[in-house]
Image (cartoon, helix red, strand yellow):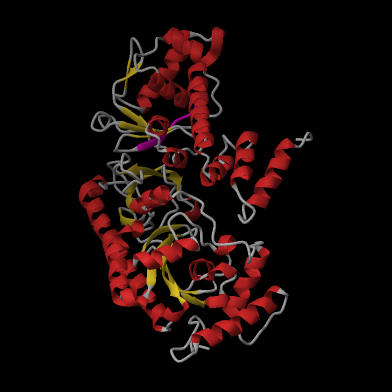
Amino acid sequence: MAASQWVAIDAGTDRRQWARTLRRAHERGLAGATAQPEVREVIDQSWRRSARAQVDPLGGPAPLVISAAEAAARWERSPLRVAEPILRELLADVGAAGQQVVLVCDADGTMLWIDGEPGVLEEATSIHLERGSRWSEDSAGTNAMGTALAAGHSLQVFSAEHFAVAVHEWTCSAAPVRDPETGETIGVLDLSGELATAHPHSLALVEAAARMIEAELRVASAERAAALRERYGERLRGGTGAGGRGTAGGGAIALGTSGGRIIESADPELRGRRLEIPHEGGEVGRELGLSLIAEPLGDRAAPDGDPSGFLIWKAGRSLPAGGAGAEPLRASLLGRDEALVADGGRSVALSRRHSEILCLLALAPEGLGAERLALQLYGEFGKPVTARAELSRLRRALPGAIAANPYRLTLELSDDRSEVEELLAAGRIGEALARYPGPLLPGSEAPLVVEARQRLDDGLREAILAFGSADLLAAWLRNPSGEDDVEACRALVARLDGTDPRRPAALSRLRRLLSPQR
């Protein structure tokens, strides 16, 4: 045994003999034996979790949950992408004679990157150590990557310490990588090879590489924060503080990173804080007892669509006069009845009726007369004078953004509905679903809105069913638009084999959806 509880083997241990000892312990463990002296506590606990997750130790290697191409695309978008030079340096350090591979999984255990000597990569592929496989503990049983993620610390796993028999000829050393800004685990780094490569120093090498990666992430985070300050810091002028203090001027009150860390603020209450900010922005600060709005900043046309940061405003303010026109309007319309609109200066949450009007104007760029607008909003008994009154109030909230005769947008409008449609048209189905929190203004009964909502729902659903990815099907069933989709649930059950831990839940859901008592 090794001196450290996270290291599996000492340098002087006879590897083959210890592997045989562990195999006997593994057999006894599967038969129900516990507290075996040969089995480390961290491994014993992992075996128990694996059994509770119904992982089949004889069922073969880890499941392939996405294609290699999709995994490569995820890698290109991953913050861990900055680690590739460090990973290749680690591979060079262990040397070709080490007969090992270096790999990275994301936070859910899906492998995104792997490299090594061609012969070792071929052996690795035989046990699904390849892009697109999922090595979370509840998918593949005890293994260094999945158990390090589950336990929250570095770990080496040797031979029959692996829960799955298919991996007993391997030894693996893994270390989680954490986001230096949020502290959240964003992935895990691993060094794997056949039993002859097992050495206690392997874990130290992996841990050192993980710390180097985190240092690179800290540098990148600091550079992004500096760029945010340089580009947007001037907007923090005379803003009223979150606690009601501040000077006149009506500027933003804080500037935050994409992770929600406040890097500059006009209010001492917010300095050094971290806010829980949704990807699309919106109302924030409730955990601090504050009422704030986060406006996304940055390039949303980028491959990952992530904002570079957020401007924070006091809730309940209208967009400033004269601010419209400097930048396009940005509207969030999906999965909500009250649109959030930003023009690069301030953000405002619209009422349900004003949200409908904005959406109708976006769907009819040629413009709408008061009569047609009244028909859309109120049906055949709607009065144009009522529609004009609502338009007048909306124009005050969005000064300079709406012209009359007919009513039409005078500013370019970017909205999440059109972004999802564009992603679907480009065949980027996973990204489209990730940007789709739910239906377009789900409570609206305006015919144009209903038509656009149904078109988007149907287009996304058909694309997901045609693609057939288990991950996409599962995500669609978690979405408000797809939660009762029997056909999608059937497709998911058909896609999952008997070793996938998601299959029992999918079968249970299908039975519930088919139940006549629903």
Horizontal relation, residue 395 to residue 487: left or right: left
Is 209 or 211 nearer to us in this picture? Answer: 209
Q: Quadrant of the C terminus?
A: top right
Residue 315 to residue 225: above or below? above
Magenta region includes residue 266: no
Q: Residue at x 31, y 48 (%)?
A: 308
**Observer able to see residue 484:** yes
Residue 154 to residue 358: above or below? below
Q: Look at the image and give the residue range highlighted in magenta.
A: 347-352
**Res. 33 image quadrant:** bottom right
**Observer able to see residue 337:** no
Is 173 or 186 nearer to us in this picture? Answer: 173
**Res. 333 image quadrant:** top left
**Res. 517 image quadrant:** top right
Percent coordinates x, y for residue 426 in the rendering = 37, 33
Percent coordinates x, y for residue 197 in the rendering = 42, 79
Is 454 or 97 nearer to us in this picture? Answer: 97
Horizontal relation, residue 82 to residue 363: left or right: left
Q: Residue at x 63, y 62 (%)?
A: 55
Residue 164 to residue 504: above or below? below
| Residue at the extreme bottom | 12
Percent coordinates x, y for residue 360 in the rendering = 43, 20
Horizontal relation, residue 271 to residue 170: left or right: left
